[in-house]
Image (spheres, grey):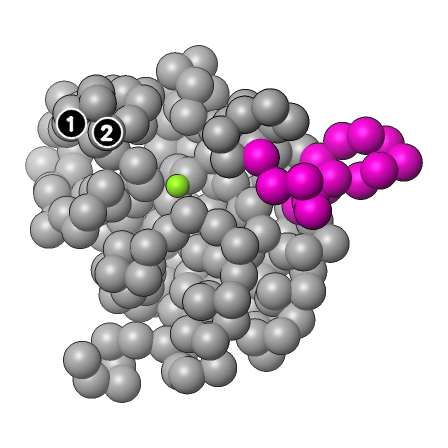
Amino acid sequence: MSAAERPDDAVMAAFRDAPGFMPEHEGLALFRAAVSAAPVGPLIEIGSYCGRSTLLLGAAAARAGTHVVTIDHHRGSEEHQPGWAFHDPSLMDPDLDALDTLPVFRRVIATSGLEEHVVAVVAPAQVVARYWQHPAGMVFIDGSHTEESAQRDYDSWVPHIAVDGILAIHDVYPDPGEGGQAPLHIYQRALAEDRFDELAPTGSLRLLRRRQPA
Ligand code: MG
């Protein structure tokens, strides 16, 4: 893979060290899509968690002189809560007895040298969307995977994707035995809208480019 197709070694090292759920091959596909989307407009990430994918979007944004705006309430999704499969006790704030992924997120981004290209917004994504007015080069949906949240993220953010911009959706599993179906459902919703062209998938990552209106 040529240098143009992957972030520099410092970013890749930070990516590999960062807590999170994005496999490297899917992350690199996301990065390449983001490189093509960043000249169109800023990159929006829904679901920052500890910044693992944010690093790749930040590296793509840096190449185009733009930003990734990454949105998360930083209290974790359902599956991150105590007693659930993806709970990490080290991410608990003991005084509040609540998850807080923001301190780790900040450290991950700081070690990558990408801070000036990463804008972290601490809020539910639909609240931020209410005030957002700028056409986006990419919307990457990787937040809570409940049906209600995934549909709400779609409602809130997909209308902001610019022509030629990319909708990226993580954790799309056609086989229900492999994972929850909400990301698949919003992917199918995007296909049914007939405003997007499908790009090649990688693992559970799906990519769609918004067409010129006919
Ligand atoms: Mg994910």
Kind of residue at badge 1: Pro
Label 2 crowd (10 A; few <14 / some 14-19 / many >=20): few
Q: Please give the name of the residue rendered at 48% of the width and 40% of the height, measured from the top-left corner.
A: 46
- Expressed as whole percent of the image width and height from the top left, the position of residue 202 reads 17, 51
CA gap, disc 2 to disc 1? 8 Å
- Expressed as whole percent of the image width and height from the top left, the position of residue 119 reads 61, 57
Number of marks in the image?
Answer: 2
Residue 159 is at least partly visible in this image: no
Q: Are discs 2 and 1 less than 8 Å apart at CB?
A: yes
For residue 178, which numbered disc appears in the image? 2
Quadrant where ligand 1 appears: top left
Q: Is mark 1 within 8 Å of ligand 1?
A: no
Quarter containing the C terminus: top left
Q: Please give the name of the residue rendered at 61% of the width and 41% of the height, measured from the top-left corner.
A: 88
Q: Is residue 1 above or below residue 140?
A: below
Residue 60 is at least partly visible in this image: yes
Q: Please give the name of the residue rendered at 40% of the width and 57% of the height, measured from the top-left corner.
A: 41
- Expressed as whole percent of the image width and height from the top left, the position of residue 74 reads 66, 39
* Magenta part of the chain: 87-101
